[in-house]
Amino acid sequence: MTLAAAVLPLLTVVVVLALIHRPLGDHMARTFTGTNDLRVERGFYRVLGVDPASSQSWRSYLTGVLAFSAVSVLLVYLQQRTQALLPYSLGLPAVPEGLGFNTAVSFVTNTNWQSYSPEVTLGYTVQMVGLAVQNFVSAAVGLAVAVAFVRAFVARRSATLGNFWVDLTRAVLRILLPGAVIAALILLSGGVIQNFNGFTTVATLTGGEQVIPGGPVASQEAIKMLGTNGGGFFNANSAHPFESPSPWTSVFQVLLMLAIPFSLPRTFGTMIGQRRQGYAILGAMAVISLVSFTAATLAELSAHGAAAQAAGSASEGKEQRFGIVGSVLFGSVSTLTSTGAVNSMHDSYTAIGGMLPLINMMLGEVAPGGVGSGLYGMLVLAVVTVFVSGLLVGRTPEYLGKRIGAREIKLASLYILTMPALVLAGTALSFAVPVLRADIDGTSILNPGLHGMSEVLYAFTSAANNNGSAFAGLTANTPWLNTALGVVMLLGRFLPIVFVLALAGAFAAQDRVPATAGTLPTDRVQSATLLVGVTVIVTALTFFPVLALGPLAEGLL
Amino acid sequence: MSSSRSTVRQLGTAVRALVLTLVLGVGYPLVITALGQAAFGDRADGQPVTLDGETVGSAIIGQGFTDAEGAALPQWFQSRPSAAGNGYDGGASGGSNLGPENPDLVAAIEERRATVAELEGANLSAVPADALTASASGLDPHISPEYALLQVPRVAAERGLDETDVEALVEENTQGPDLGYLGEQRVDVLQLNIALAALET
Amino acid sequence: MSTITEPAAGSSNSPAPEGNRPARTPGGAFSAAQLAEALPGAFRKLDPRQMFHTPVMFIVEVGAVLITAIAIAEPFLGGPEASGGSEVPASFAWLIAVWLWLTVLFANLAESVAEGRGKAQASSLRQARTGTTARVIRDYAADTDPGALRASIAEVPSSDLTLGDMVVIEANGLIPGDGEIVWGIASVDESAITGESAPVVRESGGDRSAVTGGTRVLSDRIVVRITSRPGDTFVDRMIRLVEGAERQKTPNEVALDILLATLSIVFTVVVLTINPIASSSGVSVSVPVLVALLVCLIPTTIGALLSVIGIAGMDRLVQRNVLAMSGRAVEAAGDVTTLLLDKTGTITYGNRRASEFVTVGGADRRELVTAAAQSSLSDPTPEGTSVVELAVTEGFIRSAVEGTVVPFSALTRMSGVDFPDGSAVRKGAGSAVREWVAAASGIVTAELDDAVTRISQLGGTPLVVAVRDASGRARVLGVVHLKDVVKDGLPERFAELRTMGIRTVMITGDNPLTAKAIAAEAGVDDYLAEATPEDKMRLIRREQEGGALVAMTGDGTNDAPALALADVGVAMNTGTSAAKEAGNMVDLDSDPTKLIEIVRIGKQLLITRGALTTFSIANDVAKYFAIIPAMFIGAFPGLAALNVMQLNSPSSAILAAVIFNALIIIALIPLSLRGVKYRAASASSTLDRNLLVYGLGGIIAPFIGIKAIDLVLSLIPGF
């Protein structure tokens, strides 16, 4: 392993992001600030019965988000339950209630946790008309909420945040759909399949039989990555040669995952008219992700642990074409964004190497996080950071001219409280309640001992952060995990959205305090460093004990 | 009152927003399928490999070269261990998901090392890691050049071929990293074996 | 070191130099005696109903109770429970319990000490309030008998006075309540309130009509309309404020409380879930260890000292003789972005002073100096005296002047002396003196015009001096340059304010020309000339609409609306009661420059809170490295790698963290009382400095502290 081989793929990603974040970020800013509607959009608004010029209060905006998501959950659930009646079901039966609920929630919350194995559970119609549609719109919801939050910083004494239906429509039609079409064609050129062939059985070279799957994969793969969704068309996800045939398609998928989350700070900076503020956020995201990726790569290359030592390399669960660096790059990015796609099996990573994807999620999916959710998560952390550091300079803390008072800090606190509470409570309940524990130990956990706990912890962390990746040895298709993870995904997605929009309402209603020499600047290296510090310390303090009981203990055996 | 009315109204809007499902769930994939089939044909269909008019697999999906019991057929280059179904099952992709300290995995690796070393008549330490570990997809079409080269003497012997010819074949079928630096060197086992079969005739 | 002077029993007419007020306690320091005094209070505060108001410390108390119960029960249940695979010594639970109780006690002690300082001040104030008899006028007739010389008087206890009562106070009488003089003039000893021994003059009408209950009339007789309800006089309010009884949490304090509560909830969840999750590996941690971890993680340091910081902040203001009506106002002071400063008294000395003699028409300089001095000798105004003072420096010798003094009048706008030989000197406004000279067939040269214009342009006031000789011929000798003198050091202070991000605006009734000159000299950022009260209001509104927070001082009744509108309105104690009501602070020294001090104190208050919060959270890093390996090392020996401090044993590590956690509260009491040092600097560099000290320091200090305590504990057998 030469240093160049380890560094060049990363460098490629950095260079491409540096090139595209400006046009993409500015395009998104224009999309959400422009007043002109495309003709096709005007058609949509007529169908929806929405006046595109109207603006909603935070409560109304939230109602829109929740109503849309509720209808979506119901739709995806019904499609699964009636699968047998749908075309291209490949002869697969209706999805059972528990699994159907879990899957519907999973895709609507942008999590894409998969308790099911797609090849034996879902036909093309549910994948295309149900899941892939949610890949678009759940990402669009994230973008809409983020944009509403950003508008709150621009607004002065305003009661409204924009129109959810307009933001949703524009996010889909001007950003995600064009992006997905381009990405799908590039993936197709790389060998990702797109057909309706179903399963075909062939006689192999040695005279055996092999089942070769088909499916509309490229169209789904494109939005799965671009929308940081991550739900694989196949069980092996992006490790499957039909989802990602070559190293470059894998790196291209990495770029798709990062494109929007790493461009949104630019959008943010452009919308508030202070680009440097956006770059401070971007800088904090970049530092965290670079450090995490480096640590994970070193851990995997070290081949620490019994299995890796026995094999001579941590290659269990990794594809030959991607290698260790390509696998870790994908795994890191997938967990740093809230994508959760995998091109290697995290469950088989070395203990410390597997802890880093877990930590990436525990950071709260903010570096750079999911489409939209990463930006609003990081901005909430910035609010908390500025609150503490603002006190340190002797002023009532203010961020971008908005004062952070009791109401604001309460909402930010609730936001930050939600995820750890869900992760820890879910994991603890799984082991504390005897009947659940019997199920977890007996059915769900694949690996014994410390690693088994890590599988459960990983599942709840993934669900609460709407990531969707897994220590996939865990059998999650059980009544307890389908239900618990489903509830955790719902709460992990929508409680923070409630708090963010309420916070947006509070900020929008405020006037903007002008910046003076006494105002704490938030667009410098100093503030970005502080933001990184707060993000890391909050996470470390919250999760150090459980990590010590799982991957740390395992890695330090 | 007005807030509950607004909730009901927005629920109505949400239902009407199902029009998006038509665009994104039907229109979009069909357009991509049409474009894909038109522009990329074979690729969009998974690059089927035909031998004598019969499809024998996909150029990018690995397959096993073992007997029904899973024992290696010595005249063929062997793929990596697979956790997909009973091995290279395209209907059940996936990895083993065995953890880094899992004793079953450690035992399996040691057993494979012994088996491969014996099969190839090589030192235990000469067996590369990809020969000992299952891939993520269970459908990994590739092995490392080291593993391919390790198999050359055995395959050549089985088929009565010159080792240098077989070695040349391996080198021919060795693909470097994409763009020279992305990913690993790799050998597509199915392609190699087809070439191998062609060499004999 | 501090001493508390017991107030003299019953106040006397001859105020002691220090007044009746206690000696100022130096900020931050506290003595053993104070600790001893505070101890009973600290124990009283253990009452859970009181503890509940500080959630962080309440959690610690609950933990202490729990561990005490366990320590008592353990011997009957077969000795101490092993934790995380490690045996613990028999005394472990007891030691944890003791230190948890000490943690709570230390927090309470800190609060008691802070409150104790206020109590001492309050008790001296109470002296001023007790035992006054009010002489209430029955049927007060404002028109016919404003002095109530003939009205009938009833004697009632001051505590029975109600709003609107008219009372009469004569020399040596205590003023029974806050009120407004409606008739009369008196000199009043206000030392009980202000600590200032010199008596002040109070008179009806105008801006010096307010009197405060508990102060003493030294001479004359006044009629006062009571303007406060019983029990709600200024002194009452002061007592409540300094005692902290009326202490309401300030907005930032509430916000910080929420953040601390959130952290506490997070850590409670973390600790509650440890055992269920550890059970997956068959490991169980004992309750004392879990409670120890929880107490170490929740922000006890700032939780314990938060109220102390608030009380001490108010106290610092009181020590500078400023009474804030609410903590909110103190915090707002830290946020101020625009300071409105009255020119007179704040930026310049209250009065113009003579700064220069300018001769014209070839007059003799000596003659000019003498004439100017002579014409001012009988002028008692500060301007007059300043002319004489300047003349003395130029060689004028004070001596009695024979002749008729012509005092200044609004009509003549001149003052001077008519000598017995028929000669005369005059000094006054240019036009008046010109007329006087012209009347005596004198000539006014263009040179005079030049001098007058030049002085005006410099923002000064020209006083023309002329003389008429015995023959009746008058001539102009020259001009005295009267100048607003900017107080020393102001430009530097304004520059400091600028680096703090505060804009200064000078308010003056002067014409724009004068205003501009003074503004430039003083170094203020902006000025408002020829300001009317309406202009002032408009300025405040405009600033606030731009998002600025405005602070101002004022004393007159016409300042009241502006004081009320400003975010921080500091009323001068000499001002009217309307002004005092409208403002949210009262400066007992009536020193307008104190606004700058107030801003600093406001900032210091916030910084101290932020510093201790940062320190408290940063501490957790080291505590984790002490406790987490200790908790599980028995079950997972590999975690020894995390024992970076190489602590002696699991028990000693955990106990050391708990002890450090308790002792750090005591160690930081002086800092919370004194406040973090604040230097005027940009926000960015202030942050750098404080982060380095309290953030990085907060990470490093406990590593050293815990290691040191662990070394001591390792000497105890069993640890």
Image: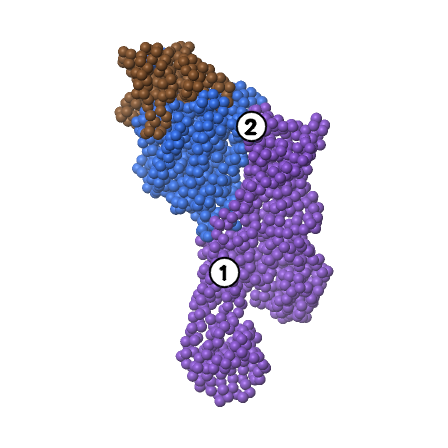
Chain colours: A blue, B brown, C purple
Q: Which of C6 and A487 is in front in this view?
A: C6
Residue C91 location, quadrant: top right
Front position among marks 1 and 2: 2
Residue shown at the point (47%, 56%) measured from the top left: C498
Q: Position of residue B58 (x, y in %)?
A: 33, 18
Chain ID of residue with mark 2: C
Quadrant position of the C terminus of chain B in the picture: top left
Q: Which of C450 and B118 is in front in this view?
A: B118
Q: Are marks 1 and 2 on the same chain?
A: yes
Whether residue C310 is visible, yes or no, is: yes
Q: Is residue A471 above or below residue C502?
A: above
Residue located at (55% from left, 45% from top): C694
Answer above or below: position of C686 versus A307: below
Element marked by disc 2: helix
Using residue C610 as the reference point, say whether residue C159 is left or right of it.
Answer: right
- Dividing the picture into quadrants, the one containing residue C226 is bottom right
* x and y percentages locating residue A314 in the rendered image: 45, 24
- Disc 1: host chain: C
Look at the image and tell me whether residue A94 can be seen. no
- Quadrant of the rendered image containing residue B182: top left
Residue under circle 2? C638
- Compared to residue A219, the image places residue C620 above or below, namely below
**Residue shown at 59%/40% (left/top)?**
C704
The residue singled out by tag 1 in the image is C492
> What amino acid does circle 2 point to?
Gly
> Is disc 1 surrounded by few (<14), some (14 to 19) or many (20+) residues within 10 Å?
few
Disc 1 is placed on an element classified as helix
Residue A175: image location, x then y, percent: 35, 35
* In this rendering, position of residue C216 left or right of residue A336: right
Q: Which label's residue is closer to the chain start, 1 or 2? A: 1
